[in-house]
Amino acid sequence: MIPMDIKTQLTEAMKQAMKSRDEVGKRTTRMALANIKQAEVDKQITLDDAAVISLLQKEIRNRREAVEEAKRANRPDLIADNEAEIKVIEAFLPKAMSTDELRALAQAAIAETGAASQSDMGKVMKALMPRVAGRAAGDQVSAVVKELLTK
């Protein structure tokens, strides 16, 4: 069996959500597919899985920000909605990388680039980000690299 790309998985999940009358699943997958389509139209290309993963991570980041704002506004209904949408989107992302795995990859990238201080952080990030694409957030990667370079 050929593994489905993420766009196909999203389409199938949307159909399934419609059949099972899962409003959160339907709304979330439909929104994700619309954002993918919009990005493809804007850039006049077909997005590959890496680009789709990046887009989905951005959606999760937006939802987490919305959760924080909803907490400040004391809106438990919005918090619940956004957290449910985050769960739906996360199902389409690759398994997250553990901190230990990330630290090991970061140490390897530091050794490869010969980085010695924080001024070399850009070189390390450039070498490391393609290896962790979709499995660790950029801010998390940045924090680990920064920590390792300041030791």
Image (tube, helix red, strand yellow):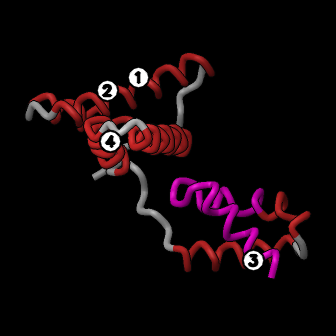
- Depth check, mark 1 against mark 3: the one in front is 3
How far, Cα to Cα, is label 1 from label 4?
A: 23 Å
**Residue contact at pointers 2 and 4, CB within 8 angstroms:** no
Give above or below for 149 relative to 12.
below
**Residue contact at pointers 3 and 2, CB within 8 angstroms:** no
Residue bearing mark 4: 79
How far, Cα to Cα, is label 3 from label 2?
A: 41 Å
Residue bearing mark 1: 34
What's the amino acid at mark 3?
A: Leu
Q: Nearer the viewer, residue 85 or 21?
A: 85
Q: Residue 148 carries which label?
A: 3
* Quadrant housing residue 42: top right
SS at badge 2: helix
Q: Nearer the viewer, residue 80 or 136?
A: 80
How far, Cα to Cα, is label 2 from label 1?
A: 6 Å
**Residue contact at pointers 2 and 1, CB within 8 angstroms:** yes
Q: Residue 30 carries which label?
A: 2
Give above or below for 109 relative to 41.
below
Residue in the picture at 39% in, 38% down: 70
User: Which of the two discs, 1 and 3, labels the residue nearer the N terminus?
Assistant: 1
Q: Which SS type dominates the magenta stretch? A: helix
Residue 9 seen in the current view: no
How far, Cα to Cα, is label 1 from label 3?
A: 39 Å
Q: Which of 140 and 95 is in front in this view?
A: 140
User: Which of the two discs, 1 and 4, labels the residue nearer the N terminus?
Assistant: 1
- Depth check, mark 3 against mark 2: the one in front is 3
Residue in the picture at 36% in, 27% down: 31
Side of 88 relative to 32 (left or right): left
What's the amino acid at mark 4?
A: Ile
Q: In the current view of this chain or complex, which residue is farthest to the left?
A: 20
Q: What stretch is highlighted in magenta?
A: 125-151
